[in-house]
Amino acid sequence: MTPQKPYLIRAIYDWLLDNQCTPYLLVNTEIEGVVVPAAYIKDNRIVLNLAPDAIHQLQMDNEWISFSARFSGKAMELFIPTTAVQAIYGKENNEGMFFPEELQSPPPSDPKPPSSPPPGTTSGKPQLKVVK
């Protein structure tokens, strides 16, 4: 099954607009693939105004949210994986939906062999031991 989160984001966005609220998106900027203006990131988070008069070419699908917006007069394309969205809520009343933080798997690392085998093991072939 496809994840619920992208559908809920789109539904809450429409609901906020229908109720004349300004949709705000809270984004975890530590998630891989997030492209937002670095100058506006605080504590690895950014809050973005998704009001139709503040952004252009909004696209929301099951994996990405993208749009263009102006920051200090400079146009910028923003890309946000849906996994990075922590909340969508109304500026005026904070009503909306907050999502649990999604864990990303840590980057693969090269495991280092232990300097000595753990207690009770020997190097070489596995051995069985009778336990009474």
Image (cartoon, rainbow, N blue to C red):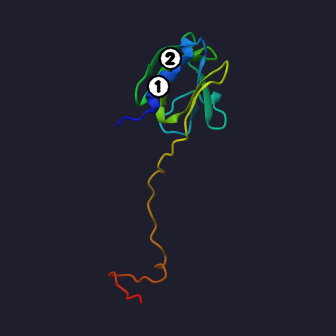
CA separation in Å, label 1 and label 2: 14 Å
How many numbered discs, if any? 2
Q: In this rendering, would 128 be left or right of 83?
A: left
Q: Position of residue 47 (x, y in %)?
A: 62, 27
Q: Name the quadrant of the C terminus.
A: bottom left
Q: Position of residue 86 (x, y in %)?
A: 56, 34
Closer to viewer: mark 1 or mark 2: 2
Q: Is residue 8 above or below residue 67?
A: below
Q: Residue at x 56, y 35 (%)?
A: 29
Q: In this rendering, would 23 be left or right of 6?
A: right
Q: Which residue is mark 1?
A: 65
**Residue 21 or residue 125, whichever sits in front:** 21
- Determine the residue located farthest toward the left in the rendered image: 125
Q: Is residue 26 above or below residue 101?
A: above
Q: Residue at x 64, y 17 (%)?
A: 72
Q: Which residue is mark 2?
A: 14
Per the image, label 1 sits on a secondary structure element best described as strand
Mark 2 neighbour class, 10 Å CA radius: few under 14, some 14 to 19, many 20 or more: some
Q: Position of residue 34 (x, y in %)?
A: 51, 33
**Residue 23 or residue 19, whichever sits in front:** 19
The amino acid marked with disc number 2 is Asp
Q: Earlier in the sequence, mark 1 or mark 2?
A: 2
Q: Name the quadrant of the N terminus.
A: top left
The amino acid marked with disc number 1 is Ile
Q: Are marks 1 and 2 in contact (CB under 8 Å)?
A: no
**Residue 3 or residue 115, whichever sits in front:** 3
